[in-house]
Image (spheres, rainbow, N blue to C red):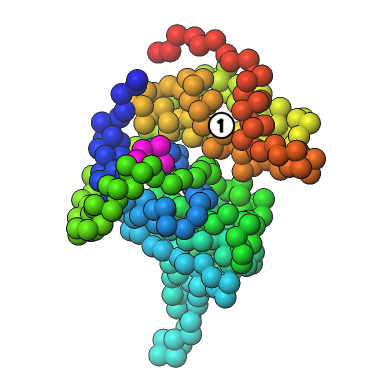
C-alpha cells in the first residue's frame, strides 16, 4: 500500500474525526479540491454529506458558505444582486453565498434549472457576471453539490452541461452497523465538528494545487485517457460519450491522486481507479441499455477491461 502525502494524510485523519468509515469519500473530495474541480454527491438524506463538506472546509482553513436550494430560490439568491444606494447615488453589489472558498450547494436538484444554471459560470470560469459586471470568486473555489436521487419527488434532473462541470460524482452510502453504533456514541457528546482544528492554511492549499499541475503525465498515459474517452463515443450502449473536457478532468484528477499518494508522476492504476468517478456522469446511455438494466458504471468498467493498459516506462 502506498504512503500518502504527509500533510494530506493529516487532513484526511482530521476529517475522520467526524466522519466514520468514509475514507474513500474524504480522499476523493480532497482529490477534487487539489485538482481545482468540484464534486457532486448523490445520496439519500442523513448520511453525512453536509458534515463532510464542513469538515473539509475547517481542515483547510477555508471560508465556508452554504446554499440551500429550494424550488423558489432565484439566481440572484446564489450569485448576489446590485442594490441602489440613494446616499451614494450608485448601485452597490451585495455578494451572494457563492462568494466563498468552499461552497455547499445543498440539494441542488431541488431547485429549477434556471437557478441551477446560476452556478455554471462560477463552476467553470470562477466568476459571476451581474448586470454586465464580472466579479471574480475567491481562490481556491470549490463546490460540493449534494443531490437526492432523481426518482425522489420534487427533484429536477441536472442538465448535461452542468453535470459536465463536476470533476467527480460519487455516493456516500449507509454506514455499517458497527460504524453506525460509533456515530450514535459520538452523538451523545459535543458534536466533534465544533472542535475540529485547521490542518493547513489556504496558502499551503494553493501551493499544493500548484504542485498538482506539475505532476508528470507521460504521453502514453495521455493516449490511454483519450482511448478510454474515445471508446465511450462509439460504444453500443452509449448515446452520448465523454467530451474532451472529460478527458482533461480525468488527467487532472489523476495528477491530484498521484500527489495524494506522494508521487510526482501518474501511473495507469490512478486512471483506472478514477475513471468511473469522472466519466459515469458524463455519458448518456441509450434507452435500450437502460431498459436492460445496464448502468453507466457497468459500461465504463467494461471499457476499462478492453482498453490495453500502457506499459510503464521508467519515471524520473
Residue 178 point in image, percent of width and height:
32, 42
Q: How many marks?
A: 1
Vertical relation: 269 (above or below) 183: above
Q: Is residue 67 above or below residue 7?
A: below
User: Is 302 above or below relative to 158?
Assistant: above
Determine the residue positioned at 61% across, 64% down: 153
Q: In the image, residue 236 lies at what x, y percent?
A: 79, 31
Percent x, y for residue 282?
A: 64, 42
Prevalent SS, magenta region: helix
Q: Is residue 185 highlighted in magenta?
A: no
Mark 1, residues whose alpha carbon is within 10 Å: few (<14), some, or many (≥20)? many
Q: Indicate left or right for 108 with 206 as reference.
A: right
Q: Nearer the viewer, residue 214 or 46?
A: 46
Does residue 19 appear in the picture of this structure? no
Label 1 sits on a secondary structure element that is: helix
Q: Quadrant of the N terminus?
A: top left
Outermost residue toward the bottom in this view: 86
Q: Residue at x 64, y 62 (%)?
A: 156
For residue 298, side relative to residue 265 (left or right):
right
* Residue topped by disc 1: 275
Q: Which residues are magenta?
A: 21-26
Residue 25 location in percent, x, y? Answer: 41, 41
Amino acid at each position: 500500500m502506498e504512503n500518502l502525502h504527509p500533510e494530506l494524510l493529516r487532513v484526511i485523519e482530521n476529517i475522520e474525526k467526524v466522519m466514520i468509515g468514509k475514507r474513500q469519500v474524504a480522499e476523493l473530495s480532497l482529490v477534487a479540491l487539489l485538482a481545482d474541480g468540484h464534486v457532486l454527491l448523490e445520496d439519500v438524506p442523513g448520511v453525512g454529506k453536509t458534515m463532510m463538506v464542513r469538515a473539509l472546509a475547517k481542515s483547510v482553513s477555508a471560508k465556508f458558505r452554504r446554499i440551500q436550494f429550494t424550488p423558489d430560490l432565484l439566481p440572484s439568491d446564489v450569485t448576489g444582486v446590485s442594490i441602489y444606494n440613494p446616499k451614494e447615488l450608485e448601485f452597490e453589489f451585495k455578494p451572494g453565498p457563492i462568494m466563498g472558498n468552499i461552497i455547499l450547494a445543498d440539494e441542488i436538484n431541488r431547485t429549477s434549472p434556471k437557478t441551477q444554471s446560476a452556478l455554471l459560470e462560477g463552476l467553470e470560469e470562477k466568476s459571476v457576471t451581474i448586470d454586465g459586471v464580472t466579479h471574480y470568486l475567491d481562490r481556491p473555489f470549490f463546490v460540493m453539490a449534494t443531490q437526492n436521487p432523481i426518482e425522489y419527488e420534487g427533484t429536477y434532473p441536472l442538465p448535461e452541461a452542468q453535470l459536465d462541470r463536476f470533476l467527480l460524482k460519487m455516493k456516500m452510502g449507509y454506514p455499517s452497523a458497527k460504524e453506525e453504533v460509533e456515530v450514535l456514541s459520538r452523538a451523545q457528546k459535543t458534536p466533534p465538528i465544533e472542535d475540529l482544528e485547521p490542518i493547513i492554511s489556504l496558502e499551503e492549499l494553493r501551493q499544493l494545487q500548484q504542485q498538482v499541475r506539475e505532476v508528470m503525465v507521460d504521453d502514453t498515459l495521455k493516449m490511454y485517457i483519450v482511448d478510454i474517452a474515445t471508446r465511450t463515443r462509439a460504444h453500443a450502449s452509449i448515446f452520448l460519450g465523454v467530451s474532451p473536457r472529460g478527458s482533461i478532468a480525468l488527467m487532472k484528477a489523476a495528477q491530484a491522486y498521484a500527489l495524494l499518494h506522494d508521487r510526482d508522476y501518474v501511473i495507469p492504476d490512478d486512471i483506472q481507479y478514477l475513471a468511473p468517478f469522472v466519466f459515469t456522469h458524463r455519458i448518456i446511455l441509450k434507452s435500450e441499455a437502460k431498459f436492460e438494466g445496464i448502468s453507466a458504471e457497468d459500461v465504463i468498467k467494461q471499457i476499462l477491461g478492453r482498453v490495453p493498459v500502457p506499459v510503464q516506462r521508467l519515471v524520473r
